[in-house]
Amino acid sequence: MTKYLEVNNLSYSYPDGHEALKDISFDLDNKESLAILGPNGAGKTTLILHLNGILGNLDKEIKVSNFEYTDENIADIRKTVGVVFQDPDDQLFMPTVIEDVMFGPKNFGYNDTESEELAIDALKQVNMIDFLDRPPHHLSYGQKRKVAIASVLASKPKLLVLDEPGSNLDPSSRRDLIEILNDLEVSKILVTHDLPMALEICERSIVLNDGKITRDDNTLNILKDETFMKNNRLELPYGFAFHHLGEE
């Protein structure tokens, strides 16, 4: 069966010679949720920038929805793969929430009426429809994060890639976000240091360390492997227990 996303022997070095990715290979099923875990400097952000065609040479090492990553296909790829960056202020720049969320669809060729309909639908998905006329800079950080997600969802991506979606959120906002992401019926890739969030959203995780995949496994299996976690500089929050999974 053809996988929705295929990454085959992807390597990447920055201009200074630093080898950030080393023969990365993995795939993703349609509507599967995958976490990418690893310490700082492991190559996680470099990897997700490749998934949107922002980095890399577009030399067919990646394929999504049967599109090979080539110069000819990059517009379709960027419509198919939506990236939500870590800082929502990097994505919100219009005078009002609705204008921000309409920006993506309009950029992809939808007319004003279609763009507004898509934006309203996206804001409903993240429970922010009551804020459509608010200036983004008047929103809380958690609200900005949800609007940033809506601004990507409005273009109807089939794969949603989120870089540290839980960072800087208070517990209530974090809980809201987990519920929203679990309800979205799209493929999802979460790059996160929030291991409990990864466990709640993604049944499967990939661990990167020093630019290489050190494990591709069930998320729970990874988090319970104390030796592996230590060797890959991963750590659960103090006092975390797996009680909600019915385990002592």
Image (cartoon, grey):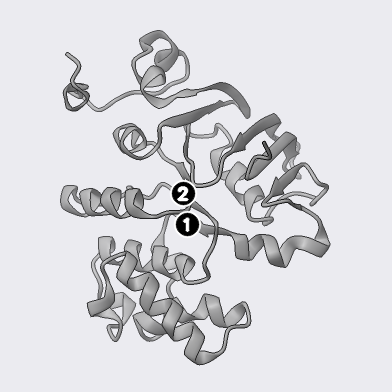
Residue located 40% across and 14% down the image:
230
Residue type at tag 1: Phe
Q: Which of marks 1 and 2 precedes in the sequence?
A: 1
| Residue with the mark numbered 2 | 163
Which structural element holds mark 2?
Answer: strand
Which of the pair 235/110 is nearer the observer? Answer: 110
Give the residue drawn at x 73%, y 51%: 66
Say if residue 38 shows up in the picture: no
Q: Say if mark 2 contacts mark 1, CB within 8 Å.
A: yes
Q: Is residue 214 left or right of residue 175?
A: right
* Mark number, residue 210: none
The residue that disc 1 covers is 85
Q: Residues within 10 Å of mark 1 (few under 14, many from 20)?
A: many
Question: Is 93 on the left-hand or right-hand side of 173?
Answer: right
Q: Nearer the viewer, residue 63 or 93?
A: 63
Give neighbour class at mark 2: few <14, some 14-19, many 20+ (Cα, 10 Å). Answer: many
Mark 2: which amino acid? Answer: Asp
Identify the element where label 1 is drawn.
loop
In terms of image quadrants, where is residue 94?
bottom left
Q: Residue at x 60, y 79 (%)?
A: 107
Q: Position of residue 200 (x, y in %)?
A: 31, 36
Give the left or right position of residue 2, taking residue 202 as reference. Answer: right
Residue 82 in sight from this viewpoint: yes
The percent coordinates of residue 208 (x first, y second) are: 55, 28
Which quadrant, please, contains the C terminus? top left
